[in-house]
Image: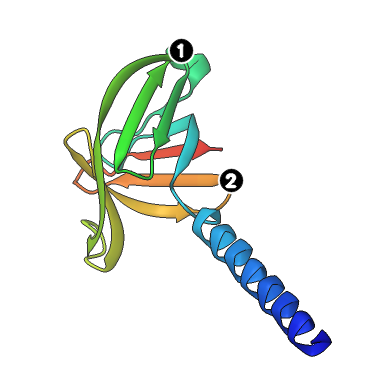
């Protein structure tokens, strides 16, 4: 009886640990979250740098698990639309990348980790936008 009891406890602990690890993997390096705009850098044909300070407003985007992106300007919601992530070719290098499409534009996901999101316009403009969590 004791062996059965300990086996059940061991089984329960093992499945609990697997569940916790799976949920960590889902959020680490995931686009799902709120992102604060830090800087935009223009591409080769139109070099510029804009920040919240130079442009006079803050911007936040929130990617939801159900495929929505909510855009805030100065903490006021201004857009709520869909987004889609898929594999595709980058404009500049013609290599396969993760692409994200929202608000009528497609971007190459250049960097995505727990604290950083950098996207580049997948067109000749090549403007880069940097967000932080």
Q: Earlier in the sequence, mark 2 or mark 1?
A: 1
Hey, which residue is sitting farthest front in the picture?
1
| 126 up-or-down from 25: above or below | above
Q: Residue at x 47, y 45 (%)?
A: 117
Q: Position of residue 27 (x, y in %)?
A: 53, 53
Secondary structure under badge 1? loop
- Point out the image quarter for the C terminus: top right
* Image quarter of residue 102: top left
Q: Residue at x 57, y 50 (%)?
A: 114
| CA gap, disc 2 and disc 1 | 21 Å
> Which quadrant of the figure has residue 13?
bottom right
Q: Is residue 105 left or right of residue 58?
A: left
Q: Position of residue 38 (x, y in %)?
A: 51, 30
Q: Locate residue 12 relative to residue 53 in the image: left or right.
A: right
- Residue 5 or residue 97, whichever sits in front: 5
Q: Can you identify the residue that label 1 sits on?
A: 74
Say left or right for 98 vs 76: left
Quadrant placement of the N terminus: bottom right
Closest to the observer, 66 or 114: 66
* Residue 69 percent across, percent down from the top left: 32, 34
- For label 2, the residue is 115
Residue ID at (28%, 26%)? 80
Residue positioned 48% across, 23% down in the render: 51
Q: How many marks?
A: 2
């Amino acid at each position: 009886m004791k062996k059965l009891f300990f086996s059940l406890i061991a089984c329960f602990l093992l499945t609990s640990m697997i569940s916790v690890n799976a949920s960590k993997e889902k959020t680490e390096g995931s686009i799902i979250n709120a992102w604060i705009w830090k800087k935009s850098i223009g591409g080769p044909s139109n070099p510029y740098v804009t920040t919240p300070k130079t442009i006079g407003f803050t911007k936040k985007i929130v990617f939801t698990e159900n495929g929505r992106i909510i855009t805030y300007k100065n903490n006021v919601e201004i857009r709520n639309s869909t987004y889609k992530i898929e594999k595709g070719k980058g404009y500049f290098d013609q290599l396969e990348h993760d692409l994200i499409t929202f608000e009528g534009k497609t971007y190459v996901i250049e960097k995505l980790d727990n604290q950083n999101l950098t996207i580049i316009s997948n067109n000749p403009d090549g403007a880069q936008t940097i967000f932080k969590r």
